[in-house]
Image (cartoon, rainbow, N blue to C red):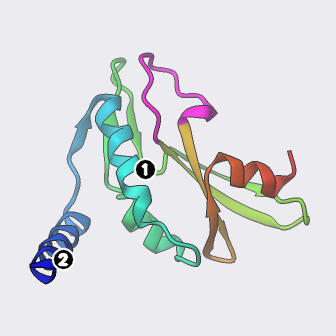
Amino acid sequence: MANRTLFIILINFIFTSCAISPIQTGLENFSYHNRARLQYITLGMSKDDVLKAMDSNAKAKMKNGRILSNPYKTEAVINAEGTTVEVLYYYTELVNIDEIGEDKLTPIVISKGKVTGWGRDYLTTLIGK
């Protein structure tokens, strides 16, 4: 029974990760979609694998008509050791307004092409702020 359940989950993941995602309706679905996908992120994962796991095809339409995509934004930051790392930000927190602040985004940190960590606490510790 457990093997059958695992097989069904695996097949579902393969089909949903390969399919082009439709535009999500509103921010609630988009934030839920991204929060659910964070479970697939692992240390050492490549950037390409992160983009696949987080569904770079997913989009959301805001009330003002603006379209959000995955990742929401990217930036290069210098860590406390002076090394530049790339940060991919994903919208993961529900808000009732059309403005998205940093506190509504989950960062995933990429260094030398691999995930070194994720989350606001990790990024804050990494850059020493």
Q: Amino acid at mark 1?
A: Asn
Q: CA distance from mark 1 to mark 2?
A: 28 Å
Q: Is residue 52 left or right of residue 88?
A: left
Q: Any magenta on residue 97? A: yes
Q: Amino acid at mark 2?
A: Leu
Closer to the observer: label 1 or label 2?
A: 2
Return the residue found at the far front: 1
Name the quadrant of the C terminus: top right
Please give the residue where the numbered disc 1 appears in the rendered image: 70
Question: What residue is shown at x 39% (from left), y 48% (from top)?
Answer: 34
Q: Residues within 10 Å of mark 1 (few under 14, many from 20)?
A: many
Q: Is residue 127 left or right of residue 94?
A: right
First along the sequence among labels 1 and 2: 2
Q: Secondary structure at mark 1?
A: loop
Looking at the image, do the residues carrying marks 1 and 2 touch, with CB atoms under 8 Å apart? no
Image coordinates for residue 82, horizontal then vertical, percent? 90, 64
Question: What residue is shown at x 29% (from left), y 29% (from top)?
Answer: 26
Return the residue found at the far right: 81
Name the quadrant of the N terminus: bottom left
Q: Secondary structure at mark 2?
A: helix
Residue 4's image quarter? bottom left
Query: Which residues, given as a range, are shown in magenta?
Result: 92-104
Q: Main secondary structure of the magenta part?
A: loop
Image coordinates for residue 45, horizontal then vertical, percent? 52, 76
Image coordinates for residue 126, horizontal then vertical, percent? 79, 58
Question: What residue is shown at x 33% (from left), y 23% (from top)?
Answer: 65
Residue 11's image quarter? bottom left
Please give the residue where the numbered disc 2 appears in the rendered image: 6
Q: Is residue 42 left or right of residue 60?
A: right
Image coordinates for residue 49, horizontal then vertical, percent? 44, 73
Residue 56's image quarter? bottom left
Q: Residues within 10 Å of mark 2 (few under 14, many from 20)?
A: few
